[in-house]
Amino acid sequence: MKLKQTLIFLIAFVVAPVWFAHAQKSRSALPRVHIFTTGGTIAGQERSDGSGGYDAGKLAIDAILDSVPEIREFARVKGKAVAQIGSQDMNDKVWLVIAREVQAALARRDITGVVITHGTDTLEETAFFLDHVIASNKPVVMVGSMRPATSRSADGPINLHNAIRLAASPEARGRGCLVVMNDIIHSARDVVKMHTTRVDTFQSPNTGAVGHFFKNKPVFWNQPGRRALRFNIRQRNKLPRVEIVYAHANMTELMIDAAVSGKAAGIVVAGVGNGNLSAPAMAALDRARASGVTIVRSSRVGAGRVDRNVEINDDAKGFIAAGMLNPQKARILLILALTRTKDLKEIQKFFFAR
Ligand code: DGL
């Protein structure tokens, strides 16, 4: 009996406190990752009508985190909802809130990195925007999912697990904004959604992905490249309006004239081939340029470079060539460029910077 009491005493007053203190110490040594949620399918709930449909952005952050309880072995995680929208509704106002929240979190010495959960429809755009406005070497990781959180084989939990692991990893520093989906790690510059439904929808058609997850850890295939240009928009509560017009056979002046009437400060052409468009549309573009609208020629093709003065004399027309940027990313870079200058030579340098 005496032995039993002694053992109980030792466990209760010696072993347990030491174990608890050790557990606390090792937990406090874990990297701290902040998660900002915006909605999307990763927080989506299937409709109970058996239609296979779902509503994006329904689940709160804790419900999403509860789907990956093991993540608490690798990071101390705290979440905050900054929006609860399908990302087709992503807008400048939410972008500016996300940028402010992320910048403030990364300024804290105790925070290792941040994760933003987001719908996949415009995820590449928010990633590209943040890549150009966040001033920090710490990891900024964006993640979504193609299947709702409540579906069979939902991809959100593994994507979120990977995103948090990535944001907590030293190897992810100095790489700008990253996107992790389906075990693949992409840079914000080149990643694009390329399939409407598949879990491997995100691809990097020009440069390829920058790494992948192997045995639950991030493995990068190259050294960090040159960082994106940085635009300081911290004092701004509004961004310039830039529209995209999509070129096609028999294109008329209609959509370009509409963008000008809508007071667009810039127009990006999703041109055919090397950023080309029909004669009537070109005439409308010349009128737009003459009225002070900044014009960038990109391509609807989806990969490759749009260069200056190939079939169109950009020097004579005062157009800018988008280089490697697809129309949706060219639009974002033009928005940011116009917060700094309208000088065409300066803006062209931004597009050819990397
Ligand atoms: N509504 C779309 C969005 O929020 C769903 C697509 C998704 O999140 O995968 O982007």
Image (cartoon, rainbow, N blue to C red):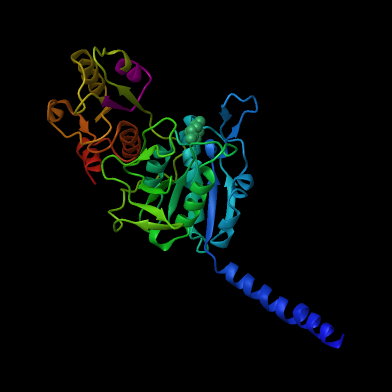
Report if residue 137 is visible in the image: no
Viewer-nearest residue: 67 or 329 = 67
105 drawn magenta: no
Report if residue 88 is visible in the image: yes
Viewer-nearest residue: 169 or 289 = 169
Placement of 275 over or under 66, stated as above or below: above
Farthest residue to the bottom: give it: 2
Q: Measured from the top left, where is residue 40 in percent x and y?
A: 53, 36
Magenta span? 256-270
Q: Quadrant of residue 321?
A: top left
Farthest residue to the right: give it: 1
Farthest residue to the front: give it: 1
Q: Quadrant of residue 148?
A: top right
Q: Is residue 8 left or right of residue 42?
A: right
Q: Measured from the top left, where is residue 175 in percent x and y?
A: 35, 54
Q: Residue at x 46, y 35 (%)?
A: 92
Q: Residue at x 17, y 35 (%)?
A: 307
265 drawn magenta: yes
Placement of 238 over or under 20, stated as above or below: above
Q: The N terminus appears in which quarter of the rendering?
A: bottom right
Q: Measured from the top left, where is residue 339 in percent x and y?
A: 35, 38
